Amino acid sequence: MRNKRKSEIGARALGKNIRASAIKIQRITDRIRGCSYGEALVLPESMPYKTCYLISQLILSAAANANTNFGLDKSDLFISEARVESSAYLKRFRPRAQGRGYPIKKPTRKVTIKSDSNFIGEIEG
C-alpha cells in the first residue's frame, strides 16, 4: 500500500569548537530557524555580530552538502534545525600570588545547521 507523506531529505553542517557564548550564537540561530535558504543567507549579513560570519558559512556548507550528497536544488531548501550545544573547555592557567596557578576555563560551542527540502513524494510503507 502506498501512502503519500511528506519526506524530509536534507543535509547538515556542523561547526565545532566555536569560541563564543551560547546566548550570542542563539540570537542568530533563533532568527534563521525555519527560514528559506536565501532568506537565511541575507539575515546574518544585516546583523552586527561577529558570529554571523560563522553561521553564514555553516548555512552555505549545509546547502552545498544537500546539493552534492542528495542532488537537491538550493532554492528548495529551508533551515529546519539550528542548534547550539556546549562543547569542550579550553583550559588555561593564570599566575596568582605565592606561585599558585588559577585555572581559567574558556567555553566552546558546537553549532548544528540542518537544511531540508520541501519534497513531497510517495513513500512505500
Image (tube, rainbow, N blue to C red):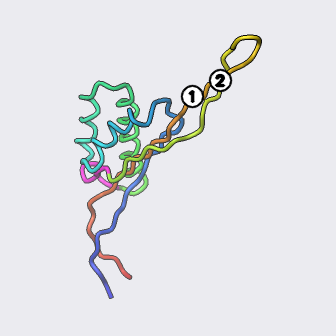
For the C terminus, which image quadrant?
A: bottom left
Tell me which segment is drawn in magenta. Answer: 72-79
Nearest the viewer among 58 and 91 is 91
The three-letter amino acid code for the residue at tag 1 is: Lys
Circle 2 sits in a helix, a strand or a loop, which is it?
A: strand
Total labels: the figure holds 2
| Residue 92, disc | 2
Name, please, the residue furthest toward the bottom: 1
Q: Which mark is residue 25?
A: none
Q: Secondary structure at mark 1?
A: strand
Q: Quadrant of residue 57?
A: top left
- For marks 2 and 1, give the CA distance: 8 Å
Relative height, residue 66 to residue 45 (above, below) = below
Residue drawn at x 26%, y 68% as measured from the top left = 120
Contact, CB < 8 Å: mark 2 with mark 1?
Answer: yes
From the viewer's perspective, tell me whether residue 12 is left or right of residue 97. left
Q: Position of residue 28 (x, y in %)?
A: 32, 37
CA neighbours of label 2 inside 10 A, class few (<14), some (14 to 19), many (20+): few
Sequence-first tag of 2 and 1: 2
**Front-lying residue, 117 or 45:** 45
Res. 106 image quadrant: top right
Q: Amino acid at mark 2?
A: Arg
Q: Is residue 60 above or below residue 78?
A: above
Q: Kindly identify which residue carries mark 1.
A: 106
Residue 37, percent across and down? 27, 45
